[in-house]
Image (spheres, grey):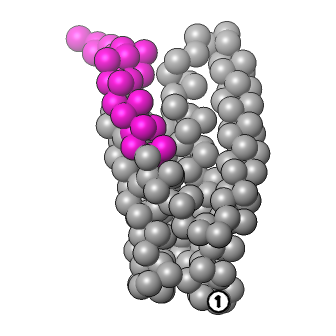
Amino acid sequence: MLFTLVFGFTQITMSVPAFLRAEAGIGEGTIGLLFTLNTIIVVLTQIPITARLNRRHVSRPLALGATLWALSFACFLVTPQLGVPAAVAAFLAFTAGELLFMPITAIVPVRLAPIHLRGRYFSLSSVVWGGSYAFAALVGGFALDLPNPAVLWPAMIVLMLIGGAGALRLQSSQRLEPVRLQVAVES
C-alpha cells in the first residue's frame, strides 16, 4: 500500500509540471507559484496536524489522504480544458492529502516496530519510498510521451482508490493504535 501511495505522491513533482506546461498551457511561473503555495501550507500546518494524527488510528486519515489525491488527479485531468482554476484545485486537494499522508509514513513504522527493530523498519520504509519514487518517475515519463498523456490521471485515480482501500484494511490492526500513556496518580 505504501508503494502505491508513494507512487501517487511522486507524480506531483515528476509528471505534473511537464503536463501542466505542455498540455494545459500553464507557464512555469504559475507552476512555481502552485508549488510555493503547497510548501507554505505544509510548513504552516504540518506540525499541529501531525500531533493530532499521532493521537488516533491512522487508517482513516490515510484513506482520506489517498481519496484527496484521487480528487487532485481528477482535477489535473481537466486542466487542459479549465486551466489554472483546475490546477489550483488540484494542488489544494493534493496538499490536503499530503498533510495527512506524510506524518503517517513516520507514525506507522514507529507503531509497528518493536523498539529494537525500529531502525530496520525505517530502513525498509526508505527502500519502499526509493523504489516507488524511481518506478513512478519512469512510468510518468513514459505516460508523458504518449499521444494522450492525460491517460496517466485516470490510472492514478484508480491507484489512489486502491491505496485508500488498502489503508482502510489497516483499521483492524491493534498495532496501529496510538500508544496511551498511563499516568500514575499518587494518593
Label 1, residues with CA under 10 Å away: few <14, some 14-19, many ≥20: few
Magenta residues (range): 159-187
Q: Position of residue 161 (x, y in %)?
A: 39, 43
Residue 104 placement, left or right of 170: right
Q: Is residue 141 above or below residue 54?
A: below
Residue 62 placement, left or right of 150: left
Looking at the image, can residue 55 be seen? no
Magenta span contains residue 93: no
Residue 89 placement, left or right of 123: left
Residue 115 placement, left or right of 153: right
Foreground: 51 or 98?
A: 98
Q: For residue 113, which quarter of the picture?
A: top right
Q: Position of residue 51 (x, y in %)?
A: 42, 44
> Which residue has dot 1 on it?
27
Q: Report the residue at 56% width, 24% height from top.
A: 110
Looking at the image, can residue 142 be seen? yes
The quadrant in which the C terminus is found is: top left
Q: Report the residue at 48% width, 86% height from top.
A: 84
Q: For residue 180, which quarter of the picture?
A: top left
Q: Position of residue 101 (x, y in %)?
A: 49, 46
Q: Amino acid at mark 1?
A: Gly
Q: Report the residue at 73% width, 59% height from top.
A: 141
Magenta span contains residue 185: yes
